[in-house]
Image (cartoon, rainbow, N blue to C red):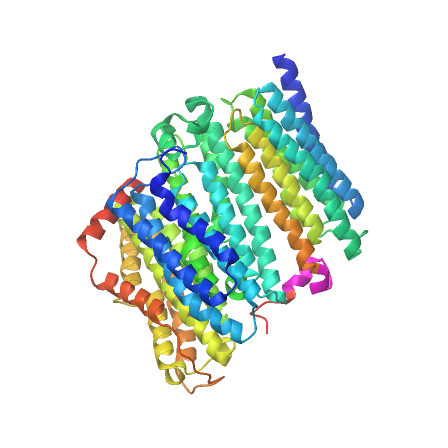
């Protein structure tokens, strides 16, 4: 493969790490190696900011996927740091064995490899294979605890995810069928860069049909209603670091695939505009997620439904389209990744110190565990959209851009946002304040990933560097 | 030659739709697995024929994978699982077989009308294949939603996936078909190993997946 060298950092490092971690027996060493390798991947991804490699037949970097890769590598790194603290406790409490952990670390890196490959893939077939790889790795990790619930969650995730990627493959084949009369046979008819240049000449009817399959297929992975069934179970039953990367990263990768195909559709004048479909699915997910938040009893399921809600908001924003809504969608995507993974870091420790995930048995966290409790409070306030956090800003931008395009659409959007806000504050009040209850175990954790993320989200809400704004604006313009 | 190539491809792809229907009304596990092996064999023949007509030797690899893995290895592995779990007779359905067949006919009509309308400009060889492939895919989905038993859901998923391979092999000159079929084989191997390792029957006392739903974090 010519031209693969610049991508070695983001692809080769996770792949090598996966192989290396498979042979390291000690989980302490493995956790450190995992973190170091993730840091190297992050550094490699940052190098793309300074020097964009030329596109090759299979891999490429452009303004859009850089954002996703950097967010991916960053959250991957902080999760590996959190995971090191988390799994130590899981070993002590006997929920997992060291053999399982060896498997876990290997799968973690192979998932990072799959996600990075999906993001840099210049080929729609390769994108599909990479998403499948990332899915398989996470399925194995969701079932790590081998309990009834974990196996059920993994099985459900597996079957629904498989049907999803099967539908996505049919859509991918249809895109090729549309491209083949124009571009001829062979690899060029599946390359993003080539497809984008010639999409105007494709048969629009086939593209329309293809997009329906792709939206449903990759939409399953995004967790859009009505194909979201796997998401709450997988988040609740797997190890918490996996919940963090599922919510923070894997959903984004699937969304990235949807966005790419949306750009493709937008380039063809005869094709149906993909916006209304995405607006419809986004709004449904937002309203469904927000309503479902009220009656949750399990704290990890609560935040899983919140992820459905937020993926709905992001899909909605990209569906609205235009420079401002796209800008807001991108910002919200990044903010949601940071905030949601931070919340899961906090929730992971909460579940460990309290020995339960049941909301009813967790009370008065700010008194019994002040640092952790206030960290959770900040995270939940951020995700609920309180100013001055970054999510407030992105939600505000989404609402105003919707107002400008179609004021009626803003009504269900605002209703959904307020419903979600109310539900989260209600649960937060119960969990964080009042008389402490439940177990009182104390332990020293590393809170750096949690507060690091929250600081970034706060910073983004207060001040966005103009370089970042220009960068996001240029991507938003490309997205159409 | 072109006419013959077209007719045989048409015949084989149509044969897959027919076998998909046969899958829908099997009520015994052993018979279901035999019919699935037939499904995979017809797929292998169809892909091999496409390889011959399109002069695309790499498709022979895909045909070989379909034959070796899906027509021989996986059915025999599933047969062992079925024996070990002692579920020879149960193929519980949620909807009556007559109703399922009617819905199936409607789905086939839908996919043929839809695909033939949409793919006017496409080369006729691939066009028929795409229409039949969509039919096989939808019938596979139908089977997954109407069966309660985990093993027969897996069979439904594999027949769905056979439809995808049919579509990909019919799309003239589509790159990465072999890689994609390998990726899918890995996926299916994972599913079968999953059934095997987790012994869903032992864990949950039944391979009936409706019983799995008893364990929900929210229902305490």
**Which residue is situated farthest in the bottom direction here?**
A435
Question: Relative to A386, is A110 above or below?
Answer: above
Q: Which residue sits at x=61%, y=56%?
A: A155
Question: Relative to A396, is B133 above or below?
Answer: above
* Magenta region, residue range: B201-213
Residue A80 included in the magenta stretch of the image: no
Question: Relative to A458, is B130 above or below?
Answer: above
Q: Position of residue A354 (x, y in %)?
A: 48, 79
Work out which quarter of the rendered image holds the N terminus of chain B and state it: top right
Q: How many marks?
A: 0
Q: Nearer the viewer, residue A299 or A7?
A: A7
A60 relative to B148 in the view: left or right: left
Q: Position of residue A182 (x, y in %)?
A: 42, 23
Q: Position of residue A346 (x, y in %)?
A: 40, 71
Residue A294 visible in the snapshot: no
**Which residue is situated farthest in the top direction here?**
B1
B140 relative to A320 in the view: left or right: right
Q: Which residue sits at x=73%, y=43%?
A: B75
Q: Position of residue A455 (x, y in %)?
A: 28, 67
Work out which quarter of the rendered image holds the C terminus of chain B and state it: bottom right
Predominant secondary structure, magenta span = helix
| Occupied quadrant, residue B37 | top right
| Occupied quadrant, residue B124 | top right
Q: Nearer the viewer, residue B85 or A401?
A: B85
B148 relative to A389 in the view: left or right: right
Residue B102 visible in the snapshot: yes
């Amino acid at each position: 493969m010519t031209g693969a060298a610049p991508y070695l950092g983001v692809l080769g490092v996770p792949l090598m790490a996966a192989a290396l971690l498979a042979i390291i027996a000690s989980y302490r060493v493995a956790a450190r190696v995992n973190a170091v390798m993730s840091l190297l991947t992050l550094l490699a991804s940052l190098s793309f900011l300074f020097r964009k490699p030329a596109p090759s037949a299979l891999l490429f970097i452009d303004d859009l996927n850089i954002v996703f890769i950097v967010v991916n590598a960053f959250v991957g790194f902080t999760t590996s740091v959190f995971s090191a603290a988390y799994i130590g406790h899981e070993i002590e409490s006997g929920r997992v064995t060291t053999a399982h952990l060896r498997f876990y670390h290997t799968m973690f890196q192979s998932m990072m490899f799959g996600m990075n490959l999906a993001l840099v893939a210049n080929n729609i077939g390769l994108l599909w294979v990479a998403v499948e790889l990332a899915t398989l790795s996470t399925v194995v990790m969701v079932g790590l605890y081998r309990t009834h619930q974990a196996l059920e969650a993994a099985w459900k995730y597996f079957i629904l995810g498989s049907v999803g990627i099967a539908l996505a493959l049919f859509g991918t084949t249809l895109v090729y069928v549309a491209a083949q009369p124009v571009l001829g046979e062979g690899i060029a008819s599946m390359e993003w860069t080539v497809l984008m240049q010639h999409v105007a000449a494709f048969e629009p009817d086939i593209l329309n049909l293809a997009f329906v399959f792709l939206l449903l297929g990759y939409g399953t992975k995004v967790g859009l209603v009505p194909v979201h069934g796997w998401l709450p179970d997988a988040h609740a039953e797997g190890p918490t670091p996996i919940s963090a990367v599922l919510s923070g990263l894997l959903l984004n990768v699937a969304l990235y695939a949807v966005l790419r195909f949306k750009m493709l559709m937008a380039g063809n004048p005869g094709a149906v505009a993909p916006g209304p479909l995405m607006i419809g699915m986004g709004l449904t997910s937002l309203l469904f997620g927000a309503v479902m938040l009220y009656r949750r009893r399990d704290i990890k399921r609560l935040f899983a439904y919140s992820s459905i809600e937020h993926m709905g908001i992001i899909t909605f924003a990209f569906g609205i389209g235009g420079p401002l809504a796209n800008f807001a969608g991108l910002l919200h995507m990044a903010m949601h990744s940071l905030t949601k993974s931070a919340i899961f870091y906090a929730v992971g420790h909460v579940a460990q110190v309290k020995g339960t995930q049941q909301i009813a048995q967790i009370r008065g966290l700010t008194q019994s565990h002040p640092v952790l409790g206030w960290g959770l409070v900040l995270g939940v306030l951020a995700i609920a959209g309180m100013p001055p956090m970054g999510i407030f800003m992105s939600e505000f931008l989404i609402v105003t851009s919707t107002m400008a395009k179609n004021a009626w659409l803003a009504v269900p959007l605002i209703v959904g946002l307020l419903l979600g806000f109310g539900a989260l504050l209600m649960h937060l009040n119960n969990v964080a304040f009042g008389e402490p209850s439940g177990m009182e175990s104390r332990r020293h954790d590393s809170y750096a990933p949690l507060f690091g993320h929250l600081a970034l989200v706060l910073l983004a809400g207060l001040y966005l560097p103009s370089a970042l704004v220009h960068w996001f604006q240029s991507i938003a313009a490309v997205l159409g | 030659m072109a006419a013959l190539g077209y007719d045989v491809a048409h015949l084989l792809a149509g044969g897959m739709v027919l076998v998909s229907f046969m899958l829908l009304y099997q009520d015994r596990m052993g018979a279901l697995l035999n019919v699935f092996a037939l499904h995979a064999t017809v797929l292998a023949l169809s892909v091999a024929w496409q390889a011959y007509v399109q002069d695309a030797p790499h498709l022979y690899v895909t045909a070989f994978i379909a034959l070796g893995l899906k027509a021989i290895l996986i059915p025999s592995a599933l047969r062992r699982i079925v024996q070990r779990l002692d579920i020879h007779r149960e193929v519980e359905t949620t909807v009556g077989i007559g109703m399922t067949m009617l819905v199936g006919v409607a789905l086939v009509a839908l996919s043929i009308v839809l695909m033939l309308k949409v793919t006017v400009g496409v080369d006729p060889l691939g066009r028929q294949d795409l229409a039949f492939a969509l039919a096989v895919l939808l019938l596979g989905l139908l089977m997954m939603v109407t069966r309660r038993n985990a093993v027969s859901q897996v069979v439904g998923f594999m027949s769905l996936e056979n439809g995808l391979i049919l579509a990909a092999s019919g799309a003239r000159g589509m790159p990465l078909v072999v890689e994609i079929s390998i990726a899918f084989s890995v996926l299916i191997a994972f599913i079968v190993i999953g059934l095997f390792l987790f012994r869903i029957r032992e864990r949950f006392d039944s391979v009936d997946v409706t019983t799995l739903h008893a364990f929900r974090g929210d229902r305490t």
